[in-house]
Image (spheres, rainbow, N blue to C red):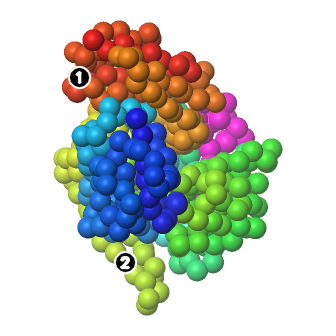
Amino acid sequence: MTIAVCYPDKYSVEEAFQLLKIPWVWYEEGCHYDVVIARKADVPGYDGPLIDLTDNDFFERISTLLNTGQPHLHEPVCDLLLDAVRQELKKYTILVEIPPAPWGHSYMVALTHDVDVTSVRECRLVTVGYAVFQCIMHGSVFAGLRLGLSRIGIGNDSWDLFERWKTFEDQLGVRSTFFFVPKKDDPGVRAHPYRAVCYDLNIDVLHDLTTGGWETGVHGIDNWTDSQRGKLEMASISPCGEASGNRTHWLLFDQNSWKVLDDAGYSYDTTFGYNDDAGFRAGILQVYRPRTAQRLLELPLHIQDLGLFGKFCWAPSENGWEKTPCLHLDVIAARTYCDRILDFAEKYGGVVTLLWHYENLTPPRDWSGTYAELVKRAQADGAWVTTAGSVVEWFEIRRKTGIGYEINKGLITIRINNPHSGHNHPMRVRIHIDPALVSSVDTEHRPGNGYIDIVCTRPEITVALT
Ligand SMILES: [Zn+2]
């Protein structure tokens, strides 16, 4: 059973099949295949079954979207295209794949927080004054008063929220990733002056979080433009030298950023998303490798609190920095907006990445209710809700896993080459076959609608057909 591909751009094909996780080979003239994917003109000597790319070059569309993105994209176009390929391949062969969701889970959710502030006392007076005004405007007079008083040192610090986050997420039964800015009072190169943050990194706070099962990462200032600075920024967050993930502050990014971050040794990036919207900038619900990166993986960002609820954000333009409107939704509309994104994940698997800013657990922007609702919905869907790093690690294992299969005398033998088969969120193998045609499987399995899922914990699986 072989699917062969003939296509000039190696990256596009390899990445598409990393996302599909279906066995395939490069086309060689004169060989026999179940189906070939190619532009007809590129395989002149071949007259067997062909998926012709001449007018429908999905490799090109997927790799362009993954690497250049698109503004205001509200559908995971790459996942839709990959599913169309899957449906087409099923016409020619019994398809075997490793879907992008662990055994026993419908999809994954990566929870993240950008830490732009850690205390009221260190903030500029104008920032706190505006926050107090917002509290009063929204009827939270008491919270506004407390915020104002804590700025001048009276009472508890309203924005010292690590303990509250820990309790809040403990109650939800989840852990998340906190991204910290590595340096104070520095807006960074090519940045608006407002971008500077006012806090000094407190390594004890980071240590306390990681001890409790949370993850910490870099909220980059200049690491997206310069790999030497990227190394320094990573070293200040992880003094012991272990690689960490990155989300760049204000989501600043250019076409060199993935290469620069990769050269600096970051384990992943999760910057590729919207400041002014929620949806699919890269058109995908999966972790992927950008073309310019050797090792770095991108965990696309789908939903952020400020994109949903905020009035505007700062965006770079030809005329310098400009205010761009955000969605500015109310709680009910925001929930509908997010549910649509989670619905896609329920259907196609993969991961939805959520960003809730550290300070938005309390007035004037207490959006914790929506955060909790989204976590609970995902849990009710059977999603694995966890840190960004855990999701990236799971995809990394799936990428490194090899899969092959053969069908012989009513037996399907599947061979899995998984370097980390002991992971506590194992992968699954899906065979696209009517479950009524399967008489036995030599390990744990579940029938679905037109397929059978098998837990992927052993190197060889045997499926007997009726
Ligand atoms: Zn930030």
Instruction: Out of 224 and 3, give the one closest to the viewer.
Output: 3
Instruction: Out of 425 and 150, give the one closest to the viewer.
Output: 425
Residue 96 in view, yes or no: yes
Left or right? Give the position of 10 relative to 384.
Answer: right
What is the quadrant of the C terminus in the image?
top left
Quadrant hosting residue 236: bottom right
Label 1 residue SS? loop
Identify the amino acid type marked 2.
Lys
Where in the figure is residue 293, as x and y percent of width and height?
A: 61, 60
Q: Which mark is residue 323?
A: 2
Residue at screen point 44% across, 27% down: 406
256 magenta-colored: no
Residue at screen point 41% across, 21% down: 408
Q: Is residue 160 above or below residue 41?
A: above
- Look at discs 2 and 1 and give the one toward the viewer: 1
Instruction: Out of 251 and 5, give the one closest to the viewer.
Output: 5
What is the quadrant of the N terminus in the image?
top left
Label 2 residue SS? strand
Q: Which residue is mark 1?
A: 434
Where in the figure is residue 289, as x and y percent of width and height?
A: 53, 54
Mark 2 to mark 1: distance in Å? 54 Å
Where in the figure is residue 12, as x and y percent of width and height?
A: 47, 60
Where in the figure is residue 366, as x and y percent of width and height?
A: 36, 47
Magenta residues?
204-221
Residue at screen point 71% across, 55% down: 265
Residue at screen point 52% across, 25% down: 415
Q: Is residue 197 above or below residue 322?
A: above
Which of the marked residues, 2 or 1, is nearer the chain's N terminus? 2
Identify the amino acid type marked 1.
Asp
